[in-house]
Amino acid sequence: MGLPRIARVFGAVNIGSFRISAMIMGLSETGELVVLGSGLRQSQGIRRGYVTDMAAATYAIRQAMERAEENAGARVQSVWVGCSGAGLASRIARVEVPIGGRQIEEEDIEHLLLAARDNIEPDGRMVLHAQPAHYTLDGAHGVANPRGLHAEQLGVDIHVMLADGAPVRNLKDAVERAHFSVESVVATPIAVGTACLSPEERELGTALIELGGDVTNVGVFKAGMLAGLVSIPLGGNDITDAVAGAFGIRRFQAERLKCLAGSAIASPTDHREMVPVNAPGDEGGEDHKVNRAELISVITEQLAKQADLVGKALKQMDYSGARGQVVLTGGGAQLAGVAEYMQGALGRPVRIGTPPELRGMGDLVRNPGFAALVGLCLYAADDPVDIRVVNRRYQEVIRPDGLGLLSRIWHAARAYF
C-alpha cells in the first residue's frame, strides 16, 4: 500500500547522553501520522543532558538529522528538540477569575489565560511550557471545555515546565549551528508521557521513570498532566562505567557485556557461565571472559542505588500509595529483567513503556530507547496551546447584568490601566 498524501512534515531531534536520534514524520490529509525516516548517531559533546562541547554536539546533531532526511527523502528547516537535563522542574499554577453566574464565552476563557500568563513566576528560570491542563467551575475539576456553561468562578490549572536558561540556550545553539531552526524545546518527560501513557493513565495517576544514559527522570502524572518531576543524575552509562571498572575493560566492551549478557535478575546457573568480553573477530580474541554472576552482581549493585533514589523521589512527590503503577522507559528499560527488579525494589506494579506503532516505523525505533523521539513527533503533531502566545483577539464587550458587569469592568481596568 502506498503512502497517503502528506499535508505537513516536521522533524524532531532528541539530544541524549548516549545517542542523538532524529525523526521526520508526516501528517496525512486524513490525520494519519507516518514515519518518513529516522537517523541516529552516538552522542558527542553531551553530558547528563548538558552541552559540554559545542562543536562535537553540533556535528553529531547534523549527522543524525542528515541520516533522517536521507531515509525520508525529504528536507526540514526546523525541528522540535528534546531536553532531558537543564535542571527541569514542573509546577502547577492555579488561577481563578469571577464570572458572576452568567454563561461562559470565548472572551472569558481568553481573559483567564491572560491572567494565568501574568501569574507565572519563573523565578529567573526559562519557561519551556505553560499549558492549560483543565478548567474548574466553582472549584469543580475535570472540565475540558467550559464554553456555554454557567459559573460564579472560572479557573484553570496551568502546567508550567521550567529549566535553567543557559543549558537550554546551548542546546538551541547546537541545533542552529547544524543549520536547523528550533520550533520548540520540549522537556523529554512530557514527550515520553505522550508516547507511552494512555490518557486514562495520565488522568488517574502514573509514575513514569525515564532511564536515560546519564539522567533518570522520575515524573508523576495526575489529572492529565505532569504534576511532579525529579531528575536523578544517574543512568545507564553509570552501570556501564561500573562494569568497566570492575573488570578492567574498556567502555565499549562493558556496554556490549551489559546489553548482551547482563541482567537485573540472577539465576542459579549464572556462576557456571563465563561470558566473552570481546565480540567474535575483535582484537584479543574470545579468551578474555568474565563470570556472568559477577557481571550481574555489579549491575544490580548500581541498580539498587538508582532504585533507592527513585523511591525517595516518588515519596517526595507524594506518590506513596502501594497500588500506583510505574512505567519504565528510556534506553535503560531494555536491560533484561529490569521491570521485575524495579517492581521488587519499589513494591509497585511495573511495566515497560514503548512508543505506539505508527506507519513507516522501523524495527530500530520500536523500543523504549526511542520513546522520547517518537513522543516529540506526537507532541509536535498535537501542537498544544501555550498561554504565552495567547493574544487578545477580540474587543471587550460589557453586558449590564449585575455582578457580571462588575466582573467585566474589573477585567477592563486590569487590561487597560
Image: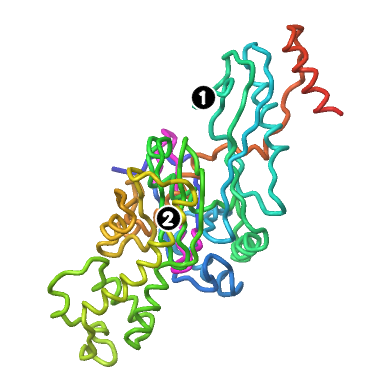
Residue 7 horizontal/vertical position (percent): 48, 39
Query: Which residue does the numbered mark 2 point to in the structure image?
Result: 72
Q: Residue furthest right?
A: 417
Q: Is residue 95 left or right of residue 293?
A: right
- Please name whichever residue, 253 or 92, is drawn nearer the observer in this view of the structure: 92
Residue 27 is a magenta residue: yes
Residue 198 horizontal/vertical position (percent): 37, 39
The amino acid type, in three-letter code, at marker 1 is: Val
Q: Residue 143's mark?
A: 1
| Visible residue check, residue 66 | no
Residue 146 is a magenta residue: no
Q: Residue furthest top?
A: 401
Mark 2 residue crowding within 10 angstroms, few (<14) / some (14–19) / many (20+)? some
- Please name whichever residue, 168 or 224, is drawn nearer the observer in this view of the structure: 224
- Please name whichever residue, 394 or 159, is drawn nearer the observer in this view of the structure: 159
Mark 1: secondary structure: strand
- Are the two marked residues, 1 and 2, in contact with CB atoms closer than 8 angstroms? no
What residue span does the magenta drawing correspond to? 14-34
Q: Residue at point 64% right, 64% down?
A: 170
Q: Quadrant of residue 297?
A: bottom left
The amino acid type, in three-letter code, at marker 2 is: Ala
Secondary structure mostly seen in the magenta stretch: strand
Task: Give the CA distance from mark 1 to mark 2.
Answer: 40 Å
Quadrant in the picture for the N terminus: top left
Q: Residue at point 38% right, 47% down?
A: 196
Q: Is residue 13 left or right of residue 71?
A: right
